[in-house]
Image (spheres, helix red, strand yellow):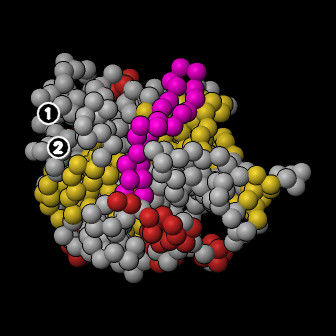
Amino acid sequence: MSTVGEGKVSSNGHGCCKSGPGYASPLEAISGPRESLIYVTSVYTGTGIEKPDYLATVDVDPNSPTYSKVIHRLPVPYLGDELHHTGWNSCSSCHGDPSADRRFLIVPALVSGRVYVVDVKTNPRAPSLHKVVEPADIIQKTGLAYPHTSHCLASGDIMISCLGDKDGNAAGNGFLLLDSEFNVKGRWEKPGHSPLFGYDFWYQPRHNTMISTSWGAPSAFTKGFNLQHLSDGLYGRHLHVYSWPGGELRQTMDLGDSGLIPLEIRFLHDPAKDTGFVGSALTSNMIRFFKTQDESWSHEVAISVKPLKVQNWILPEMPGLITDFLISLDDRFLYFVNWLHGDIRQYNIEDVKNPKLTGQVWVGGLIQKGSPVVAITDDGETWQAEVPEIQGNKLRGGPQMIQLSLDGKRLYATNSLFSTWDKQFYPELVQKGSHIIQIDVDTEKGGLKINPNFFVDFGTEPDGPSLAHEMRYPGGDCTSDIWI
C-alpha cells in the first residue's frame, strides 16, 4: 500500500492528496470533503429523440442556489452512442504517484463502441471533451466492441471491459487497454484467455487476482430481454478469475441456476481482504466469493431476494432484478437495488457470512400503488408498495444505479438500466424521463430514508426527457477507487 500523504485538500476542491490522486486508504477517504457535484451520463439513444447523449453536471451542495439542478450539459458529437458506465484516468490505485492526476472521466459508449475522454479539472462545473477514441481504431487493433466498465491501473493505463466483437458475438469479448494518453495499446488478457461473456470487473493486487462477470451477448441484450435467449445460452452465469496483472484465466466459477446473469462485482475495499460480492440480476441473489485454502476461489449465496407472485404482468413471478450494488468504504454496509420490485436495501456485512437487513425503502418499481401489477402473498392476499412522491413528483421506473458519498451518509439513485430494457419494462420512463433521488443513511444502526428536498428531474430537459444512468463525484467514490 502506498504511504499516507499530507492529506491536504488540493486547490481544485477535489480532495486529492499531494502525493497523488485519491486517498491512501479507504478509511482515509471517508474523511474526505463532502461531494458538491455529480457527473451523470444522460441518454437519448433509443428514446426516439434524435439528439446526442450527454454528460450532465448536477449540483448536490445543499447550500447552493442551484441545489439538485442540472447546471451543465456536455453533448457528445455523435448520435446513437448509449453512454453507460464511467471511470477515471487515475484513482487511489495511483495515490503514491505525484505525477498522476484525477483529471479525466472515461466515458465508454456501450452501443457505438466509442470511448470519450472528458476533462473535468479545467472547469469542474462545466466539463469539456478532451478526446474521442474511435471504434474503428479499437476494432482494428483489438477486435473489441461494446465497451463497458473502465478502471484506472496503477501503471497509468486504463482498462475497459468489452462485451463482444463488432458483430455482437460474446465470443469476441475481452479487455481493452488504453495508455495514459488514451491511445489503444491492445488487449489486457493473454491470447486464448478471453472470458465466455463480459461485463464488470474488479482487481485485487494483494491477492494477484482480477475477477470479471457475465451479462450476455450484445446481439441478444441490445434487442431487449427475451427468455428464449437465456435458453439459447446467450446470457452468462460465470465468474472469471484471472492472474493479476498477468492476464491468464486461471479459473471459471459456474454460479449455476442461483447465479444467472451476474452483473456488478465488488471486492471489499480493504485490499488485504480476500472476499467480495457479485449481484446476479435474474435470480436476484447476492453471491459472496472468497479464496480457499488451496488458493482457488469459491462462492456461496449470501442474500436471496425471493421472486414475487404477481398478477397482470408478463410472467406469473417477478424477480427483483439486482442490477447494481456497492459497499461502504468501511466495509460495514452493502447496498443493492431491485430494479423491478422497486426497493433499495441496506445490509450490515461486518459478518460477511451472515448479512443482516438494516434498511429498506421503496422508491419505484412495477408493484407500486397505482400500477396495474399487483403482488400476491402466500395466503392469496394482494398488495402493492407504498412509494411516496417527492416535491409532487411521482417516482418513475425502478432504482438502478446507485452511488454513495465518501462518508456513507448519502446514497444517490438513478433509474435507467439500458434504453431497450427501459422501453420494455418501464415505457413511461422513456416517455417522461429519468430522475435522481437521494437517500439519507443511518451509518450507526442502519436505516434508509428518502430526502424530500432532493429531486433532479430529467423529464424537463431542454431537448426532451432523457435517461440518467451512472454517477461519479469529482473526488472519487465507492465504486471507482481501488486500493493496492
Q: Residue at x 16, y 49 (%)?
A: 126
Q: Is residue 332 magenta?
A: no
Residues at discs 1 and 2 in contact (Cβ within 8 Å): yes
Q: Where does residue 223 sit, x and y in percent of width and height? A: 50, 77
Q: Is residue 115 above or below residue 79?
A: above
Q: Nearer the viewer, residue 118 or 291?
A: 118
Q: Residues within 10 Å of mark 1 (few under 14, many from 20)?
A: few
Q: Which residue is mark 2?
A: 124
Please, what is the three-letter code of the amino acid marked with disc 2? Pro
Residue shown at the point (37%, 49%) measured from the top left: 456
- Which one is earlier in the sequence, the residue at label 1 or at label 2? 1
Q: Is residue 440 visible?
A: yes
Image point (25%, 22%), residue name = 3
Q: Residue furthest right?
A: 379
Q: Residue furthest front?
A: 392
Magenta stretch bounds? 434-458
Looking at the image, is 358 positioned above or below residue 416?
above
Q: Quadrant of residue 163?
A: bottom left
Q: Is residue 453 magenta?
A: yes
Where does residue 34 sit, x and y in percent of width and height?
A: 31, 28
Mark 1–mark 2 distance (CA, rounded to whole Å): 8 Å
Horizontal side of residue 298 vs 100, given as left or right: right
> Which mark, residue 70?
none
Q: Residue at x 21, y 52 (%)?
A: 72
Label 1, on which residue? 12
Q: Secondary structure at mark 1?
A: loop
